[in-house]
Image (spheres, helix red, strand yellow):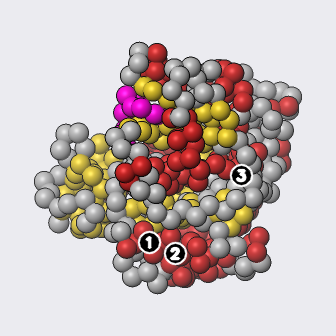
Amino acid sequence: MSKKSNPSITVGFVSLGCPKNTVDSEVMLARIGQAGFVLTGQMQADVVIINTCGFIEPAKQEALSVIRQAVKEKKKGRLGKLIVAGCLSQRMGASLLEEIPQIDAVVGLGQREHIVEILQTVLKSSTKQPVNRQFLQPSSEIIFDDSERLLINPSHWAYLRISEGCSRQCSFCTIPAIRGKFRSKPIDLVLSEARQLAEHGVLELNLIAQDTTSYGRDFGLKNGLATLISELEKIETVEWLRLMYLYPASIDEALIEKIAQSSKVVHYVDIPIQHINNTILRAMHRPDTKENTLHLIQKLRQSIPEIILRTTVIVGFPGETDEQFEELLDFIRWAQFDALGAFPYFAESGTKAAELPDQVPDSLKQERLNRIMLTQQEIAFEKADRMIGKQLTILVDETDENGRLIGRFYGQAPHIDSVCLIEGSFVQPGQFVQVRIIGREGYDLLVKPV
């Protein structure tokens, strides 16, 4: 489409949620820019698009808050049309228009590729009254081509989505209902996207999916993730490959061996375990067991001694007793995770867990969450203190508001982990640099170039 077709029409864009949402936002931004619209990150624009998350209640409330903020700008006349896209649109559908009637269009996940046409349809209405259009066709069979993206983050790293949806039946999770069943991207498409990103200067590829370890199983590819890694390693300019969201029950010997032997896969593994008590795991419909998880952690640390382990846990799942919570807490002390995210359980409508008896009071969930995070804080601080004096290779990301450079070593994933704060350096973002750790500032490491 010619860039002259939409002269000087401004489109504000807000991206919320997880890395998968970020990729969707980057694709939409590229399509909108290619169509000649003027992109801005401001709420004051001819059209504002909010790409939402709706996975759990806090994400839903954050999205609704941002939408209502946009509505205020619309009422003041500083915003023309309002389009809401993404997971919350897919999940709530027409009810989102009923709750916030000032929205001009609700766009589901399956309509991502039609965002330009939707924009033009909304703009055709000259009236100040909301258009109230719905674009909610199913996305459950679509395998998106994520080529031609306008990267939101620093241009030397990017997310590489390798599959869509999830076929796991975790009783607390809304993802299968929102994004559909699991389906792997064809390996040629993944490699094409990876090469394109590399050609544009990306040095670090962060592999993402709802269930990364199942890559290729739906089309009969044995050891699919390991096979994909072998192909990605051939892209010469890519220095780091990072594996996110590895379903613990699916991590096998072949994958561990591949990570251990690879010269490009960073020794960082994100394995969301959710809980450790076997009764709770069964209620969550997780195939993991405490015994298998203990064995997996031991195996990972034996095979890859310098590995960094990250996990996620849920506290206050229906029926969780004091004893079961203490079991989880003891396990965290034993496992000594390098990074850990914890969430109180939210009873999401439409999930099986929401119908379970013995829902845990919110006050008790918060108390347990606080204990988990204080325990993990002690572990993280002790680990950071033991690192002082060591040398690392870090990738410089950006400059903060105080003019200080920020980077990451292999054990820090972008946007979710701590960072390295670089003192006294003139290196540029996108460069690797050797540093020595000289201290810490909270969870972050203070480093100085060697």
- Please, which residue is most extreme toward the top here? 76
Q: Is residue 46 magenta?
A: yes
Is mark 2 in CB contact (under 8 Å) with mark 1?
A: yes
- The first of marks 1 and 3 along the sequence is 3
Look at 50% across and 78% down and name the residue there: 232
Secondary structure beneath dot 1 equals helix
The magenta span reads 39-48
Location of mark 3 (residue): 139
Residue 93 in view here = yes
Q: Is residue 55 left or right of residue 336?
A: right
Secondary structure beneath dot 3 equals loop
Q: Is residue 374 magenta?
A: no
Residue sitting nearer the eye, 335 or 15: 15
Location of mark 2 (residue): 192
Q: Position of residue 380 (x, y in %)?
A: 44, 47
Q: Position of residue 379 (x, y in %)?
A: 47, 47
How far apart are the alpha carbons under marks 2 and 1? Answer: 6 Å
Secondary structure beneath dot 2 equals helix
Location of mark 1 (residue): 196
The amino acid pointed to by label 1 is Gln
Query: Can you tell which quarter of the image residue 161 is in?
Result: bottom right
